[in-house]
Amino acid sequence: MTDAILGFLRANGEQLDVDIAAALDIPIVDLRDEVARLASLGDLICCRVTRFTDGRKIEGTSCRLSCDPPTPARGRKPGVKKTDDTETSNY
């Protein structure tokens, strides 16, 4: 079951526990036990979330791989601008 959960998250990214259970056809109680075990080992990062879909409140646990950070935003990154060193003051 561990390999199936980790493989699913590698392929699909961050998912809710109910979505993982439905996709892998695993009972939600068993999945939550396994996710808690994987989180304690440091393989997964989990947090409790509340989402509203079509006016319905959905509470669950969002899970992602701990080694899978979000991709950085595209484009220029803010940073220090280069200055002209010709006008330095001497003390």
Image: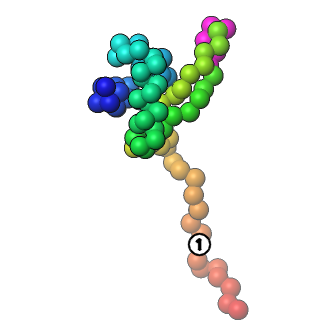
x 46%, y 25%: residue: 32
Q: What colour scheme governs how the chains and residues are painted in the rendered image of this protein?
A: rainbow
Q: Is residue 11 above or below residue 28?
A: below
Assign a secondary structure to mark 1: loop
Q: For residue 90: magenta?
A: no
Q: Position of residue 8 (x, y in %)?
A: 34, 25
Instruction: In this rendered view, identify the residue nearer to me: 21 or 86.
Output: 21
Instruction: In this rendered view, identify the residue nearer to me: 65 or 76.
Output: 65
Disc 1 marks which residue? 84
Most frequent secondary structure within the magenta stretch: strand
x 50%, y 41%: residue: 73
Magenta stretch, residue numbers: 51-55
Crowding near the residue tagged with mark 1, few <14, some 14–19, many ≥20 C-alpha atoms within 10 Å: few
Q: Is residue 58 visible?
A: yes
x 56%, y 22%: residue: 60
Q: Amino acid at mark 1?
A: Asp
Picture mark count: 1
Q: Is residue 41 above or below residue 91?
A: above
